[in-house]
Image (cartoon, rainbow, N blue to C red):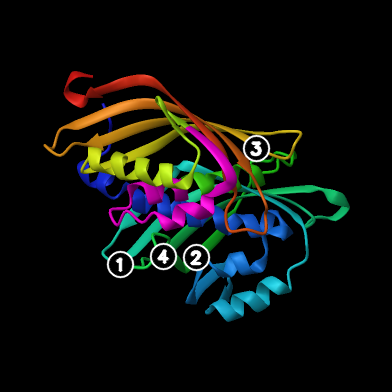
Amino acid sequence: MSALSDDQVRHGYLTHALLAQLYRWWQFYERPESTLANQLDILAENVHIDSSGNAVDSRAAYQAYAESLPQMQNAHWPNMSSMSVDIGDSTLSASLDAKYVNIGALPDGAVMNAGVHYDVELARSDDTVLPTFTKILIAAGAGDGSTEFVDAYANNRVASLVHYYLALLGDPAKRLDPFAELFADSFELHFSGTDIATFDEFAEWVEGYSALTDASMLTMESMDVAENSDGTLTVTIDFEWDGIMPDGTRMEMGTRHVWNVVDDPSQRFARICSIDVTRTRDMASQASS
């Protein structure tokens, strides 16, 4: 049985929107090609950022700071089990821990790692499902002593794409146009017997999917990202699906998604080439599961 409350299911799209932006925060530091413009895109004009006592109080001040940074190898591995989220009427906030790994800060190419704690606040908008950061507090602590650098960019890049897709899918405003940014020029989607190859077909599917429930949420149970020789990424994700039906009944189901993704780091998000969905557990009411 799902541990999610009805409110968590109904507000799940906001949690996904927050995570889409959080994963985008790390990408600028992990790939220079991710561009400062995309980093500024996630920040409110009056954002307050404090990294272990180094503080700025506006997007313009952060831009000047970011432009002065030396290029180093960075990786951020969030501990999602440590994350707590609070949803307000006009704001979102979260707290979580992550492992930070770096090459360049220490001499002779030595690997530095630290435990990092984040407290963030974001402002919601009526114009887009994506919120913007108004506060980012970063406190560094002791690392775990490991000396291996494992690149996190592909994982964080894909995670931001998946969470934005899920935020749009669950958004009660049912905005369709923003999905276009998430698909390659040609794509194929295979959803439990439904094959989709055009954006109009996808829009029709979204409208039908949204009409099935009062609210639904997909919770990521696991994600594996493989980098392919042609530059694409293959992503295997196990999801727990929770739905609140029009009569109030709670339903649940297990699904596995296999995504093929193409990435241009200069764009806001990577893009979907294909999705194949299979059920790992049939839909059932929670009372009977």
Q: Look at label 2 and name its amino acid.
A: Ile
| Image location of residue 27, percent across then percent down | 63, 55
| Image location of residue 249, percent across then percent down | 15, 33
* Mark-to-mark CA distance, 3 and 4: 29 Å
Q: How many marks?
A: 4
Tell me where residue 210 sits by quadrant. Answer: top left
* Mark-to-mark CA distance, 1 and 3: 35 Å
Does residue 278 appear to the left or right of 264 in the view shown?
left
Callout 3–callout 4 Cβ contact below 8 Å: no
Answer few, some or many: residues within 10 Å of disc 1's Cα (few below 14, many 20 plus, some between 14 and 19): few
* Mark-to-mark CA distance, 4 and 2: 9 Å
Mark drawn on residue 136: 2
| Image location of residue 200, percent across then percent down | 43, 47
* Mark-to-mark CA distance, 3 and 2: 30 Å
Q: Start and end of the magenta stretch?
A: 163-189
Quarter of the image with the N terminus is top left
Residue to which mark 3 is pinned: 233
| Earlier sequence position, callout 3 versus callout 2 | 2
Callout 2–callout 1 Cβ contact below 8 Å: no
Does residue 254 appear to the left or right of 238 in the view shown?
left
Q: Look at label 1 and name its amino acid.
A: Ser
| Earlier sequence position, callout 4 versus callout 2 | 4
Residue to which mark 4 is pinned: 122
Q: Nearer the viewer, mark 4 or mark 2?
A: 4
Observer-nearest of 270 and 179? 179
What residue lies at 28% left-to-right and 62% top-to-bottom? 88
Query: Can residue 95 be seen at all in this image of the molecule?
Result: no
| Earlier sequence position, callout 2 versus callout 1 | 1
Residue to which mark 1 is pinned: 90
